Amino acid sequence: MKDLNFFEHIEELRWHILRSVVFLLIVTLSLFFFSKFIFEDVIFGPLDVNFWSYKVLCKIAQDFCVNEIPVKLINTEIAGQFFLHIKTAFMLGVIASIPYFLWEIWRFILPALHKDERNYAQVLLGFGFLLFLIGSSFGYFIIFPITLLFLTGYTVSDDIVNMPNISNYFENLSDTVLWTGIMFELPIIAYFLSKIGILTTDFMHTYRKHLYIAILIIAAAITPSPDIFSQIMVAIPLFILFEISVIVVARVQRFRGVNQS
């Protein structure tokens, strides 16, 4: 493949972005026409006491056993449900399209990689797809139900009835799923940061204790339940992802050292 100048790189990037936008629009339109399943079975799934997560979590700890989720969703705007429908389809479209976005990024950087790097990065990209799927599923089936149970069960007075706006409910759900999926991309992020020399194993080893504390803080932030068990359940996958990231960075540095020698 011939070398490209700056403007040719920009043109190439433009086409990658354009294909990503078209793919997102197609996915969004497809999801828009499957609203019944999306809302009743997916969006409102965690509001059902028979939701799969509650049954599993109940076997782990009695605190998660519920007979009722004391919340009733409301809509306070005339066009609220219409715009919610559009926003829901778009947000789910973004979440569903992230693997494709990563693939377009891979295609863009592919010409700049050596043969051995391509093989390694290709495996890493597939691993990234899997990590995002696991992360978003973890957010949907574990983090959000735990958060919902705690927040809907937390009261300052019996005279207050929980009637959140449907938009607020969806924003909390989509943010949890999206950011948990992105959070699970830590090894992939570490790979690219190490490729450009920003992240090193020395840095990760030196600040390992600090980063572990940061992970515990993140786990506490995304699981507002005071139950330490819930926070540990969230923190453990992040600890594992951090250690995988250390291995990834070390391999990148080792390869760069071999390449330069």
Image (cartoon, rainbow, N blue to C red):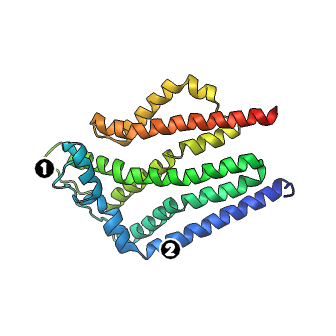
Residue shown at 27%/36% (left/top)? Answer: 226
Residue flagged by tag 2: what amino acid is it? Leu
* Left or right: residue 46 compared with residue 138: left
Tell me the quarter of the image containing the C terminus. top right
The reply, left or right, for residue 158 in relation to residue 130 is: left
Residue 138, compared with residue 259, is above or below; it is below
Q: Which residue is mark 2?
A: 29
> Which residue is painted at 59% across and 68% down in the image?
23
Task: Name the residue rendered at 77%, 34% in the picture.
Answer: 258
Where's residue 136, x and y in %?
A: 44, 53
Q: Nearer the viewer, residue 173 or 64?
A: 64
x, y percent for residue 241: 50, 39
Q: Which amino acid type is shown beneath numbered disc 1?
A: Asp
User: For residue 237, what is the image quadrant?
Assistant: top left
Do labels 2 and 1 touch, CB within 8 Å? no
**Furthest residue in direction left, as rendered:** 158
Q: Would you name the residue on which mark 1 appears?
A: 159
Task: State whether residue 79 appears in this view.
Answer: no
Query: Does residue 252 sit above or below 88 in this rendering?
Result: above
Which of the two labelled residues, at mark 2 and mark 1, occupies the earlier sequence position? 2
Q: CA distance from mark 2 to mark 1?
A: 42 Å
**Structural crowding at the residue carrying mark 1, measured as other residues with C-alpha within 10 Å and reported as few (<14), some (14–19) or many (≥20):** few
> In percent of the image, x 39 and y 67: which residue is there?
84
Whether residue 215 is visible: yes
Tell me the element at label 1: loop
**Tag 2 secondary structure:** helix
Of marks 2 and 1, the one in the foreground = 2
Where in the figure is residue 1, as x and y percent of width and height? 84, 58
Question: Which residue is at the far top?
Answer: 206
